[in-house]
């Protein structure tokens, strides 16, 4: 196997090394391409560009493989918890009992937000997008704790990471409560990470309330499945911002903004919106599927940019979805419509031939709807789940002694040099 790639241009040949990853992925290192040949590469949307070397997450889209730090997502979803998976992503190894207890203790210790931050929620209109509030309040959290800048040093990384991971769920729940005109709850010390989030979201302070264990576990699985996914739009944004040596909170806030878009973190919202349109129109699932095949309708929640096989996360979350719906006895016309759509599409040769299988967004939207999570909060839960991956990638950038600020090139297609025309002479 050759250890170099040769580019011939203008009668000259240039050799570039081939880098091989631990899973035998190959990449041509073109970092000296412009210096040696005067050329740059053009890859609109970065679909074939490796922006970094990373040891965090491995994806094989053709085989339907997803691993965090080498551990298959199937094993983590079955045996792990969200805090343990977060620890794995951020520190590279599964924690032992003492390490996990310490980390959980930090999550509990830092779950409160500064009391003055509670007043900031009042400055947002009641219909403000929750993702806008989340991004702003993550940035604000750094202002209330100036010591966080010092805590981002490598020897205090765990403290800073635990603060961000813990506070993000408190901020998210508070933004929802304010939008509903409800009092903001204080976190409880006796609940797990995910159970505490559901308590903060839905429980009333004057009534006893214990989150449903089946729902807690299902949502914990949702968080695990979303914890990282290689160099997607929001993670690449976090790394880009981190390369300027911006802090962890600022970089994560930028990730929230990138995740906000309907093509990324809003995809599961689009699934529910599609189901609502079908339900309100009274159209049959069979008729809708026919319109999809004739390109007169768009099917949301099927297929994936990376996976050319079944999304491995979708298989896991479907089982969690089936279990939680059965145990909670949920009856919802949209959920029944979704399950019917899944059944019809998986039997149709049109979708089978094109490998258009339900993805993680299809089922996560169903679970969140069953949990009575408002539609606008769907991407917020995605952000909570993705936080460990963002933190891990932020750390990877900041701990790289050879890292430089990210600065992509471009191919300019605008006007060539022109002469300035005074205003009076312009037509």
Image (cartoon, rainbow, N blue to C red):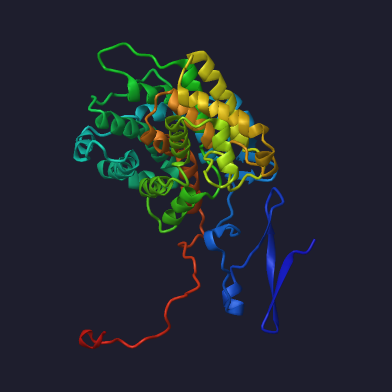
**To which quarter of the image does residue 35 belong?**
bottom right
Residue at 59 percent of width and 68 percent of height = 31
**The C terminus, quarter of image:** bottom left
Q: Which residue sits furthest top?
A: 208
Residue at 46 percent of width and 23 percent of height = 333
Q: Where is residue 159 drawn, in percent x and y?
A: 40, 37
Residue at 50 percent of width and 35 percent of height = 86
Q: Which residue sits furthest right?
A: 1
**The one of 256 and 189 positioned closer to us in this rendering:** 256
**To which quarter of the image does residue 143 belong?**
top left
Residue 83 visible in image: no
Q: Is residue 399 left or right of residue 356?
A: left
**The one of 243 and 426 positioned closer to us in this rendering:** 426
Q: Is residue 306 left or right of residue 161?
A: right
Q: Where is residue 396 drawn, in percent x and y?
A: 51, 50
Q: Where is residue 348 drawn, in percent x and y?
A: 67, 35
**To which quarter of the image does residue 162 belong?**
top left
**The N terminus, quarter of image:** bottom right
Residue 23 visible in image: yes
């Amino acid at each position: 196997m050759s250890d170099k790639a040769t580019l011939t241009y203008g009668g000259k040949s240039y050799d570039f090394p081939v880098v091989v990853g631990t899973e035998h992925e190959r990449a041509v290192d073109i970092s000296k391409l412009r210096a040696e040949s005067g050329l740059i590469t053009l890859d609109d949307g970065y679909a074939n560009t490796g922006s970094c070397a990373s040891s965090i997450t491995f994806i094989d889209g053709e085989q339907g493989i997803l691993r965090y730090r080498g551990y298959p997502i199937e094993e983590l979803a079955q045996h792990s918890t969200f805090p343990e998976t977060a620890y794995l992503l951020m520190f590279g190894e599964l924690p032992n009992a003492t390490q996990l207890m310490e980390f959980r203790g930090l999550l509990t210790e830092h779950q409160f937000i500064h009391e003055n931050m509670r007043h900031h929620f009042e400055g947002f209109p009641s219909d403000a997008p929750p993702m806008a509030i989340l991004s702003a309040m993550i940035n604000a959290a750094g202002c209330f704790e100036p010591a966080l800048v010092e805590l981002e040093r490598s020897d205090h990384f765990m403290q800073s990471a635990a603060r961000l991971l813990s506070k993000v769920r408190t901020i998210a729940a508070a933004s929802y409560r304010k939008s509903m005109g409800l009092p903001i709850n204080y976190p409880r010390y006796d609940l797990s990470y995910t159970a505490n989030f559901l308590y903060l979201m839905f429980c009333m302070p004057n009534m006893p309330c214990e989150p449903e264990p089946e729902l807690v576990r299902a949502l914990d699985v949702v968080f695990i499945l979303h914890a990282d996914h290689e160099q997607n739009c929001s993670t690449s944004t976090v790394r880009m911002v981190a390369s300027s040596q911006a802090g962890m909170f600022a970089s994560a806030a930028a990730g929230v903004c990138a995740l906000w878009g309907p093509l990324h973190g809003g995809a599961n919202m689009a699934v529910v919106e599609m189901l609502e349109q079908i339900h309100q129109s009274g159209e049959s699932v069979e008729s809708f599927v026919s319109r999809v095949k004739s390109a007169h309708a768009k099917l949301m929640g099927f297929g994936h940019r990376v996976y050319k096989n079944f999304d491995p996360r979708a298989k896991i979350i479907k089982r969690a979805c089936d279990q939680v719906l059965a145990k909670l006895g949920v009856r919802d016309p949209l959920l029944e419509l979704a399950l019917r759509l899944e059944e019809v599409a998986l039997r149709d040769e049109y979708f089978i031939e094109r490998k258009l299988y339900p993805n993680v967004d299809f089922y996560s939207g169903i679970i969140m709807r069953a949990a009575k999570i408002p539609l606008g909060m769907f991407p917020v839960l995605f952000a909570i789940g993705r936080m460990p991956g963002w933190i891990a990638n932020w750390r990877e950038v900041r701990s790289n002694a050879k890292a430089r600020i990210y600065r992509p090139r471009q191919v300019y297609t605008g006007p060539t040099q022109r002469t300035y025309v005074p205003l009076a002479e312009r037509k």
